[in-house]
Image (tube, coloured by chain):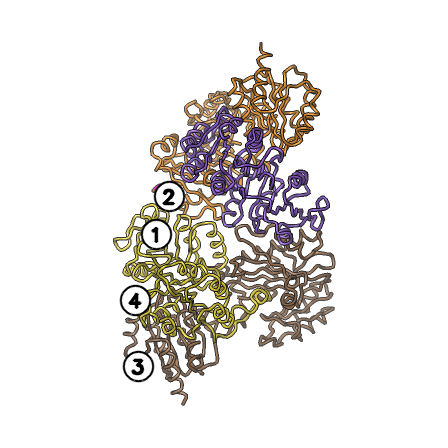
Chain colours: A orange, B brown, C purple, D yellow
Amino acid sequence: MNLIEYHAKRLFGQHGIPVPAGELAYTPEEARTIAERLGGGTVVVKAQVLTGGRGKAGGVKLAHNPDEAEARARDILGLDIKGFTVHKVLVDPGVVIQDEIYLAILLDRAARRPMIMASAAGGMDIEAVAEETPEKIIKVHINPQIGVRTFHSTYIASRMALPQELWGQFHNVVTNLYDCFISNDASLTEINPLIIDGDGNLMAVDGKMTIDDNGLARHPELAELREADAETASEREARKHGINFIQLDGNIGCMVNGAGLAMTSMDVIKLFGGSPANFLDIGGGAKAEQVTAALRLILSDKNVEAVLINIFGGITRGDEVARGIIAALDQVDTKVPFVVRLAGTNATEGRAILADQNMTTAVTLSEAAQKAIAAAKGRGV
Amino acid sequence: MNLIEYHAKRLFGQHGIPVPAGELAYTPEEARTIAERLGGGTVVVKAQVLTGGRGKAGGVKLAHNPDEAEARARDILGLDIKGFTVHKVLVDPGVVIQDEIYLAILLDRAARRPMIMASAAGGMDIEAVAEETPEKIIKVHINPQIGVRTFHSTYIASRMALPQELWGQFHNVVTNLYDCFISNDASLTEINPLIIDGDGNLMAVDGKMTIDDNGLARHPELAELREADAETASEREARKHGINFIQLDGNIGCMVNGAGLAMTSMDVIKLFGGSPANFLDIGGGAKAEQVTAALRLILSDKNVEAVLINIFGGITRGDEVARGIIAALDQVDTKVPFVVRLAGTNATEGRAILADQNMTTAVTLSEAAQKAIAAAKGRGV
Amino acid sequence: MSILADKNTRVVVQGITGREGSFHTRQMMAYGTSIVAGTNPRKGGQKFDDQVPIFATVREAVEQTGANAAVAFVPPRFAPDAILESADAGIALVVCLTEYIPVLEMVKVRAYLDSTNTRLIGPNCPGLITPEQAKLGIIPGNVVMPGSVGIVSKSGTLTYEVIGALTHKGVGQSTCVGIGGDPIQGTDFIDCLRLFQADDETEQIVLMGEIGGNAEELAAAYIKEHVTKPVYAFIAGRTAPPGRRMGHAGAIVEGNVGTAESKMEALTAAGVVVVDHPDQFADVIS
Amino acid sequence: MSILADKNTRVVVQGITGREGSFHTRQMMAYGTSIVAGTNPRKGGQKFDDQVPIFATVREAVEQTGANAAVAFVPPRFAPDAILESADAGIALVVCLTEYIPVLEMVKVRAYLDSTNTRLIGPNCPGLITPEQAKLGIIPGNVVMPGSVGIVSKSGTLTYEVIGALTHKGVGQSTCVGIGGDPIQGTDFIDCLRLFQADDETEQIVLMGEIGGNAEELAAAYIKEHVTKPVYAFIAGRTAPPGRRMGHAGAIVEGNVGTAESKMEALTAAGVVVVDHPDQFADVIS
């Protein structure tokens, strides 16, 4: 789950990293009030949306006084940035920037460790820096058993040629960012830029943060920060039921257990010339209730002309799935044809439950995919 | 460094382990006051000395009211227990004991880990239990990277057949004792007995604790708890100068660098029929000041009839040692003969400094030991 | 002798009395797996189904039954400790099926396991099965058959799919291992490739990957260097829409790796036969 | 090639600018050791004695000079981190001379090192020397001579004593290792026995123990099982007064091990020649 800049920086601040004292505004008037509260001087008004490229899209503007702050907020609120509508802006005090540093901590799957990434060439073009001059990107893995030590931050500071008088501050920022990363179950914390301000001090001027979805259960306060527009209504509904769902634009609805098998089902549908309407994984050990919810989601998509149900039971049991299908058909009146392929744990029991439902059955995945494509065509004709 | 029961239990209490609410008394009157403050009921008056066997020596007495507390304190204060004079007593409230458990955490050098040791057969005879029924002593090593986990305490509780309703409390005691061990740089924390009291709760009724001397530098508050009679005046003087010194009863004073070489020098003296007056290791990298202090200590022992100086320089330098010897001879007027053996780093420079001091020199340790024995005999005759 | 587990493997089930634990313990026992013990901290001394002794801790199970492998059916909150407990008790092989463990918990567990002799399979995996010998986990016993193909897969149900497709065509397996799809795994493709390469009973290897991460690219490099047995692969997610990425860090770290194309190219370049469809394995192998 | 270090070992000195660090770096260089770098967090970019480059961190030293061994001359407060720093930078061999490190710090460091490929010698040790090849630490270079006796010792100056006595009688050494006398060591007797047993240039082994702990007893058991080369030993502290013991735990754990008698008996029973006096080694060996 991604956090907007404001929430990321608020967490950074709670972990002792210097951040600007800005606040969120939902209306131009609020933006004015905040600008006044910040002293009436220069502020930056920044669109709070979960996408990059805000600057180029006109989502970040300087304002020299509260009047301008209100006007700039009015310009920005309601903008569409890469499909995201701006509903709120961050009003941050203006800062003098002597230098810009890039600093991030993320999980490096290959090394199985958190990794600090830093560069003296911080700012907007950091991806270009990484592409063209990769030696300017400094990487340090952190073994969680020892955490961030002084030698880690010293290595980065030395490689970046950071002035020695800032090494102490820099160590604190790195340590605090690591704490923030670990204690919030983050998979990414990023400061870009970490600036050297007019007084020669470090400050995190922009921030991004991603929280591991599996960690949210133990951070209810973070779970509440989910942005309403980060997911569609269907995706939200799916998440509530513990279902992984991504809407696509094909005509064959898919209900599968397991992400790998779900992707493979889509791959096989495409291989045989069909087009999946969605990715849907009911998860491991799904109960009838989840199956029902999954089918409701699939059937609420008007493009769906056939449904492929592919369940290979392991921890999930065929009889539970079959009961969920029956329950869904009781709730939703549909004429869409179903192709059902049940295998593995309790598949026989499941097939017995569905025996009198007039559904097409299949033994292999190929067969199931081909039958679903045929069913969809038959209906489409 | 060993702590008396009172200080050990105070630290246990600070780490959340239930302990009796007793206090230290230095006079019988103080004992009465404390007994009154504790409610006027039954108390236990316990000698606070750094040795075992207090009970058998009459150092632990029950008192049923403040009058008796004063009387028992009067009995105990001033007692000699295995060479230690009792200068203070602990007055603890009386407790009902349903059962006694043994629980300790110590460093197991062989395993390189802290080890929890526990037994349902707690109380005075735990060493006999270990000897006769070792299977009743439960041992669990703790890897410091994961610390004490529930499964550790559950294993112990299950093996001890502790009633399940106490497992939660027991886990807390174990965890807190481990915290106390780690955060105080202890090499031993021991509760014997850990009782189940009249209300069915756990409480640490007696405690012992040893602090790693190398850890004392970062625990100044603990360093102050050193008992005055835990070391002799000479040993205290030695410690102040960073010298390892143990008084013995022979007639050849030894000054050596390194504990292994110091012990070997004593072994060789004995091998050739002599008798060392002390163990003395000036440590690694000793400066002239320490050498001077060491010689003053040796020469203050009236039994010393010869001094063997055996220095094999590594981090310690021969010239520094020689300068220390000269300085000591300036301060102390002595007729005791010196046998000096300098080798290793800057030995040549050292020998040059001592050249006109009319000291016996030796090349090998055997030679040095034999010459020192001869010198002592010569003087003794 | 196949890899990781065989008929001599002595299994303790952590969480044997839970809903999933009890159901799948019965399935494992029915398959012939030697289930010697179960654990539940509050039920030490009892028996599961009147035959399997339950202990409060894994260490007691090890001391009293000689268990040398563990299968953990434990909720996400308790799973990291369950793994540590087995490692602490000296268990050589721990299979953890649990899904939804916070990834940083697994980072810590995995770093700790590096200092032990314990191998973890999973988490969030279906476990492993050596046909007709031992099943540690939830791979359906009725889809496998003994043979010479070693299977390693990131996916759960997709693994069953592939095994089923092979068995359907009479192609048997030496051992099938689901290593799990979580970012941090106890055992990865390379570990299994090494084991299969060294295993006398394995003649061909099937590797099932999926998009994301760079485990397949690393496996390809390893195969090129160290694996002489024929390897076949499938990558799931060829038609998946590209995910959204947050921040610059991911892009800087992963670049173009992680796509199905990148993985298939790397594997093909390493001499691996990459199929378009799991049903094709049986044809290319036999 | 002797053990642990030879003329190809590339050494970085941690704390090269300190009082001890600079003195002994010059000694090591004078002995011919390949000192390729030093560290001081605040002096990166400078040179030590106009020739050895100083880096802010060990990792920079490794990246720029190919250092593969480190010698740490660092105060107790900073020594644990210095060891971790070298391990983190991938250094294969770290020699830590520092005395007075709190033992629980070393427990943590040692547990961590178990998950790395770094070998630690020490702490509180004189380091090691391979005559005429490399000196990592403070063993005086003028007392050693090349030969076939491998020496391992818990003690510092006693090690010099023994080496000196051997050299005095013309008995040379392959490598001399002072493992340190602290309760927790990076490398123990058994590690060194294993290395000496496998080393072509070592024909006899001298082991110098002292009272306390049970390392000598464990070494005796190992020798009995695994060491075919002749082993000679001396135990210091035969005449030391018994120490005071606190609490029951020590007695329960250690029983009667730890005394000079226990150690000498165990070694003798393992076929080790135990001498009464360090000067006797040369006689029994040659």
Q: Residue at x 36, y 38 (%)?
A: A120
**Label 2 to label 1, Cα distance in Å?**
15 Å
Q: Quadrant of residue C126?
A: top right
Magenta residues (range): A155-160
Q: Which residue is mark 4?
A: D142
Query: As shown in the figure, which amino acid type bears the numbered disc 3?
Result: Asn
Q: Nearer the viewer, mark 3 or mark 4?
A: 4
Give coordinates of residue D28: x percent, y percent. Answer: 31, 60
Give coordinates of residue D263: x percent, y percent. Answer: 49, 69
Chain under disc 4: D
Dot 3 and dot 4 residues touching (CB under 8 Å): no
**Label 3 to label 4, Cα distance in Å?**
27 Å
**Label 3 to label 2, Cα distance in Å?**
59 Å
Mark linked to residue B358: 3
Query: As shown in the figure, which amino acid type bears the numbered disc 1?
Result: Thr
Q: Nearer the viewer, mark 2 or mark 1?
A: 1
Density class for disc 2 (Cα within 10 Å; few <14, some 14-19, many ≥20) is: many
**Label 1 to label 4, Cα distance in Å?**
27 Å
Query: As shown in the figure, which amino acid type bears the numbered disc 4?
Result: Asn
Marks 2 and 1 on same chain = no
Is residue C12 placed above or below A316 in the rendered structure? below
Marks 1 and 4 on same chain = yes
Mark linked to residue D39: 1
